[in-house]
Image (tube, grey):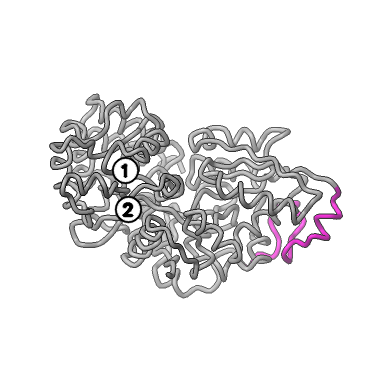
Amino acid sequence: MKLVTFRRRALAAGAVLSTAALLTACTPPGSDRDTPSGDFEAITAPVTTEQIAALGDVTLKVWADSGEQVTLDDFVPAFENRYPNVKVEVTIKSFDDIIKTVVNAMDSKNGPDLAEGNQGYQTDGTLVKAGLLRPIDDIAKAYGWSDLYSAYSLDQFRWNDDGTKWGAGTLYGNNPTTQYIGVFYNLDLLNQAGVQPPQSYAELEASLPVLKDAGITPVVFGNADKQAAMHIFGSLAGRCQSADDINDWVAGVEGATFVNDCNLRAAQTIEDWVAKGYVSDGFNGTSMDDAAAKFGDGQGAYFVAGDWFTQQLVETGKNFGFTVPTGDNGKRVSTGSSGMGWHINAKSEVALVAAAFIGELHSADYGQKLADQARVPIADPTATVSNPLMADDIASAGLLFADNGQTAYLDWATDTMYDVFGSGLQQMMAGQITAAEFLDLVQSDWDNFQSSK
């Protein structure tokens, strides 16, 4: 089956590319750069085994999010076998740990040569502003990424020189997979309650009291690390507004606002789910990963989360499905992006090895391997899968993209939005602030950031 990889918009702080520009441009902005800016030796062709061998024995230090574990378990041994003089040292961290520590790590004397960051101002913007990343336009050109990746896929890793605007400019990262938020469901528990897999959010909401009355936890949820509630909010906010509306706000378009009826409805829906006991107990003390494990163990009917959890849920062997429900207008709108960007440390003395690593990881040749690992590859549109849950994942991605419904993650909007948004939702769900006060809190952070640029 084919993967639909084009996205609708390339987001920038204050500038948004049109749909036509995305779908017709054969080279993304910045791809004409033959050399990286700064004092870096340009890479003009794919790195060869002879070039790596000439370096002698070297170590490549890699930091990665936990979602890369299965991929790296497969990729690293093959890479080391191809380059026997290279030892790859992998450090796996949780998402929260990565975004809290990667800036200081990249700035340290013994930091990683290659590390994942996170799109948006908080992490990638800070890394760019501090001059900690090697530009990789030359690597992108050497490995032909403009032919393998849509403009949106690359533009979310482009920044101006001072790290104050993103979506165009110099390329600093890439990821070979796409990801988005949807709804996992336990088919056995739905059948037990006489509920059909929901195709819309209206059907999902109608099923919640039915599941609860049947003695089944409707929604497994863990929000200790602030992500999960943002993901649920982003999905619910897509029920009644377009991707353009959401993306304009994230991009910092003048006049955009978070305070609107649809976002208020999304926040109040979350309040309602908590008040009626539709979400699992102790959610503010449970991490998202622990919630995923509980769902995988059969402790609830639904799990609203990123499709990256497909990987571990496939391994349970249980009867799970996955969907992106439609909103009020029958269209699908949900947050998503390429995966977390791979970045080369500007201080790395083995940048050539890092270039070979990301060049091969992002190749079309590795796309089928990614699909086999229950990930959705961007560079190989012909990848096929046999697992039903992974097939749901790929099919849902195609439907989401066909509806032009993928939006940037809401916390990309400012350098402090991850904490403001996440903490605000935690307070709202604990009854400490109202839904309207939550919206005002978020918009205030957005306003302050726009005025400071």
x, y percent for residue 210: 13, 42
Q: Which quadrant of the figure has residue 130? A: top right
x, y percent for residue 43: 74, 61
x, y percent for residue 21: 44, 71
Is residue 448 visible in this depiction of the protein?
A: no
Q: Earlier in the sequence, mark 1 or mark 2?
A: 1
- Residue 321 - label: 2
Q: Mainly helix, strand or loop, the magenta region?
A: loop
Is residue 401 visible in this depiction of the protein?
A: yes
In the image, taking residue 382 as reference, residue 331 lies left or right, namely left
- Give me the residue at 42% from left, 70% from top: 1
The crowd level at tag 1 (other Cα within 10 Å; few <14, some 14-19, many 20+) is: many
In the image, taking residue 142 as reference, residue 396 lies left or right, namely left
Q: Secondary structure at mark 2?
A: strand
Q: Which residue is mark 1?
A: 303
Residue stretch rendered in magenta on the structure: 32-56
Return the residue nearer the eye: 315 or 50: 315
In the image, taking residue 337 as reference, residue 136 lies left or right, namely right
